[in-house]
Image (cartoon, rainbow, N blue to C red):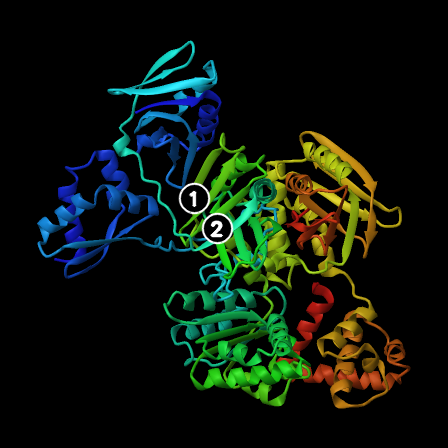
Amino acid sequence: MNKEELWQAALARLQFNVSRANFAAWFKEAVILDWQDDLVSIGTPNSFSKEWLEKKHHQDILKALNEVCSEIKKIKYVVSKQQKTNIESRPPVAPETKQIQFEEFQLNPRTGLNNRYTFKDFIVASFNEMAFAAAEAVVQEPGRAYNPLFIYGGVGLGKTHLLQAIGNKLDEEDEIKIKYISADKLVSQIVSSIYERSIESLKKEFQRLDVLIVDDIQFVAGKEKTQEEFFHVFNALYEKNSQIILSSDRLPSAIPALEKRLRSRFEGGMVVDISRPDYESRRAILETKIKEWKADVDPEALDYIATNIQNNVRELEGALRRLIAHQNMKKKKLNLESARKVLRDLTRTQTKTASPQKIISSVAAFYDLDLKELTSETRKKDIAFPRQIAMYLLRKDLKKSYLSIGNLFGGRDHTTVIYACNKIEEEVSKDGRLTDEISMIRQRIYGE
Amino acid sequence: MKIEVLREKLNQAIAIVGRTAIKSASLPILEGVMIKADDNAVHFLATDLEVGIKVSVLAKILKAGQVVIPARIISALGRLMNGDKVSLDLVKNTLVIKDDENETSLQILNSEDFPVIPQPNEDFSIKINGSVLSQALSQVVDCASTSQSRPEISGVYLRIAGDQLTIAATDSYRLAQKNIPLSEKVKKEREMILPAKAASHLIGVVSESDNLIEITGDDNQIKFGISLGESPLNLDVEMVSRLIEGTYPRYQDVIPQKPPVSIRVDRHEFIGKIKAASLLSDQTYEVRLSTQSEEGRLRIEARSSRVGEFKSSIVAEIEGGEVEVAFNGRFLSDALLNMSGSDVQLSLTDADKAALITSGDDQSYLYVLMPIRSN
């Protein structure tokens, strides 16, 4: 007889000694936690039932147990911890929810993950299927399939979602130690632990992990001390086959002021990109969301959103959300014309023309350079190359004359500008990575 | 059981315990109040299986014993009685209640069914002024989450560390925190989550008492020992509550550090405007604020598609730039009403980051409020 059967047998006897209300209130929720020889431990849901059973029914219970199994002589009563209820699945985000929550509260304090992000909600289309496949492989065989997994791509394309989904999926396993952290938080933790002289214990804490996920790793650019400490953590984890997952808005090689040894570590596993969604993918995302939110949207209006919002999945969802909110308010379906009105200012930011200053400053920011450096005389390669990209973009996007572009860079000769534009044009045609970089810079210019 | 007790004391005791008694289909006895007489005191007990409360009063005990009667009836009866003195006499299965003019016989409930109110271990002990605690709890308890989906934030967080008691509550949209100094340092830090209902109940019991409350407890339960009124005509109240299991979120992370924009306004004037604006807003109570640094004014606007529109502005000291932000007007006026002092300061980052609300007069209290996403 096991402890469950013992308790069932005892309850069968006890039900005749107590009133039905009392039996339901006090006995049904109690369980036998442990049974060893002559001692039985009874767990109760709260201290009221513990008191009740112990003070009022101890003799009855002992007698009943003893009848079932004569060797039982002693009973211990304990309040057993409430069963941990599983974190309930998130209610679908209604389009009209406007009250913002504390984001920090959504996070699992142990892992730093937000359980809102799941694979189920991740919409796979051609632009992200490679990254998705890599993520799935990592979930299947953490630490073995691809280590590290490095996912890069522009703002609002779902990198964080994918990273968190991997973490949440792996977290379903017991006893797997996961930590999700954004690189800027990592930097500030390392800085403050250096200040508090607790860097060793911080490192130890990281080194016992089975899975470490660092989002937006490009933020370690130029943070030498952080890079050094992170390098050691990385090596320790890698050696014991712990999975490392990183995300960035660009390739490791394009992260400025990143130590060589770290860069080669980052490139040592699987590097995979999430590119901008094509029209079909954008359409598919919108269709999925409509189903999820149980909304009814005019196909032409949908087409309008998919055509006009190109760079960013988050904005795509935002536009749809806004359209639905308007529909709910007006209580009627919006046609293309009214949809256009509602979304006017959103699409305007998409097609707005950038100023030359915006282009130059975005290029400078992307390569982590000073504005002054970019327009200076210097011919150092790591400055000259971004400068050529800036020139290329000014010519390509703003149709500026070679002469005026030259003037923007401290009166350079127009032939220099022509050379730069041709050179980048040619490299773009044969180097896919450069295309990616340029599209990310464009996203900085037009996207935000 | 046969006792004589002052009518006023009987009424006070019943009023305190009566609120804990509940209607319960599965356990009808919980509607009852237990009256228990021993040596020279009479004890009134009630419980809802979350909170247990016991009020003890000096009385003339002619015969010890115990009885359980429905709380609802005795508390209504108590208010209608006359004279100084009331006698309670258990005769077979009825309780005979007599005052100068009336005699009532009440059917009793089976006192054997009445739960035993568990007593926690005294793993810690602090003392605190009753009205100070009550005031502090009332400043935060409204922020506790009313949803049971996250039990750990459905209560009030208590933290005892060093010589300070910190009380906080949040529903993940807003957060209130109050610090109270303790007269003695505690040796060991302790964190607890008190159910919001127990907190509200406690506020009601101790609001006007300047006596010290003794708080003790263990990991599962907390006990408040309260003495109301002057001895020997005092009421001794003992309230035991279950504690909510779980880890309270690290709410310190949501308190914004040095938000760049600060707005200082007259508190009472601001409350008036926000209340007016809330009347003219939709179900979300959306009230929009925008700074006008040059004029030194804060604009307050609200619009409802059904009711109409409200526009106003008040004098404000604005530093750190311009900002436009929308809040739930109810949450905002709650916050302002919980503050003290003549001025209030709003510190903001931008339209979708948490706002910090403080009063210059009271550094021990702060309120953090998330905006509404405005279209």
| Residue highlighted by disc 2 | B193
Q: Residue drawn 45% across and 65% down? A: A168
| Residue highlighted by disc 1 | B241
Q: Quadrant location of residue B306?
A: top right
Label 2, residues with CA under 10 Å away: few <14, some 14-19, many ≥20: many
Q: Secondary structure at mark 2?
A: strand
Which quarter shows the N terminus of chain B?
Answer: top left
Circle 2: residue type: Ile
Query: Which of the chains bears the disc numbered 2?
Result: B
Q: Residue drawn 18% across and 56% down? A: A3
User: Where is residue A196 drawn, in percent x and y?
Assistant: 62, 76
User: Where is residue B128 drawn, in percent x and y?
Assistant: 56, 47
Q: Say which of A367 and A393 sits in front.
A: A367
Q: Say which of A202 and A440 sits in front.
A: A202
Q: Is residue A79 left or right of residue B342?
A: left
Please say whether residue A290 is visible from this viewpoint: no
**Relative to A184, does residue A47 appear above or below in the rendering?**
above
Circle 1: residue type: Ser
Q: Is residue B290 left or right of residue B127?
A: right
Query: Which is more N-terminal, label 2 or label 1?
Result: 2
Tell us which disc is closer to us: 1 or 2. 1
- Per the rendering, the mark at residue A109 is none
**Relative to B341, does residue B279 appear above or below in the rendering?**
above
Please say whether residue A172 is visible from this viewpoint: yes
User: Where is residue B84 drawn, in percent x and y?
Assistant: 47, 17
User: Where is residue A175 drawn, in percent x and y?
Assistant: 37, 70
